[in-house]
Image (cartoon, rainbow, N blue to C red):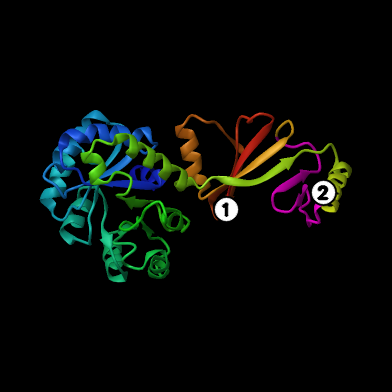
Amino acid sequence: MNSIEERIFNSGVVPVIKIAEEKDAAPLAAALGAGGLDVLEITFRTEAAEAAIRNVAKSHPDMLLGAGTVSNVETVKKALDAGASFIVSPGFNPSVVDYCVKNSVYVVPGVGGATDIEAALSYGLKTVKFFPAEANGGVKALKAISAPYGDVRFMPTGGIDASNLASYLSFDKVIACGGSWIAKEDLIKANNFTEITRLAREAVALIHGFSFAHLGINSEDEGLAGEFADAFTDLFFVKQRDIGVSIFITDFIEVMKKPGFGRFGHIGINTLNVKRAIAYFEKRGVALDYDTLRLKNGEPSFIYLKEPVGAFMVHLKSY
């Protein structure tokens, strides 16, 4: 990934913004940032788009700012001059793609099927926007369309909201989703930036899908671990699973055969994507223990946080 694509991936969702008045751009960006999102796409669907991009670029230079609904080269130039860092188009427009590729501008063209994907590949592009995602059949259709293209990644947009975001992000060929539900035009017009911040925070929670995986309990030795497991089984008629270093009692309790991480043990937390979660915690200044990092198919699948929570260490794992 280049640096722009990596930031889009780490964000997980790109708010797609239609803004009517340029004065609302800076407070909108502030509201999204307060909710934990630092990437946004301002669409050229209004006359205020160019000025809005310029305002955000000036007031929030740390934000990754894209220009959407770009359908001609003139608009590309306006967007870049205003401060946009990447270009998104609703369909595959050869003139837009050609200009961006020749000028080393990161561009995500819209695709609806194999023909468009082939066109993108002919320009050396491997990240495209699946649009309109839900109208084109949603996740099921995306999986079918993408099957012949192992190296292509997608940013689905259109019809995505809090109810289906996680289903898209669970597909490993999706780098992020575009969505307008976080900052709808009516919320911006009403200056309801508090609600936009709330929706951004809700989206961040959905992006990571954090949930309880299991509780790990330390034992002094293998004998005591076995006694604990047997007692639990006798009480609740649950099965045991010995995995060598520990015994699982159901899927939610792990008894270590010797003292492990944490004073009392550890807590496992599921997340949709460990790589994205690592970026999230690093951004928040939370230290991670990279000596514990595990990879699956070359991607992070497991890691401990550096510091305990109470008497327990915490590790992240993929679903």
Circle number at residue 176 = none
Residue at 18% from the left image edge and 38% from the top image edge: 52
- Which amino acid lies under the numbered mark 1 shown in the image of this protein? Tyr
Of helix, strand and loop, which one carries label 1?
loop
Residue at 74% from the left image edge and 46% from the top image edge: 254
Residue underneath mark 1:
319
- The spot of residue 278 in percent (x, y) is 51, 40
- Which amino acid lies under the numbered mark 2 shown in the image of this protein? Phe
Instruction: Say whether residue 66 is visible.
Output: no
Quadrant in the rendering for residue 123 = bottom left
Of helix, strand and loop, which one carries label 2?
helix
Comparing labels 2 and 1, the label whose residue is closer to the camera: 2
For mark 1, does the 10 Å Cα neighbourhood hold few (<14), some (14 to 19), or many (20 or more) residues? some
Residue at 15% from the left image edge and 38% from the top image edge: 21
Pointer 2 or 1: first along the chain: 2
Residue underneath mark 2:
232
**Marks 2/1: CA distance?**
25 Å
Q: Which residues are magenta?
A: 236-261
- The spot of residue 225 in percent (x, y) is 84, 44
Instruction: Say whether residue 304 is visible.
Output: yes
Residue 297: in magenta span: no
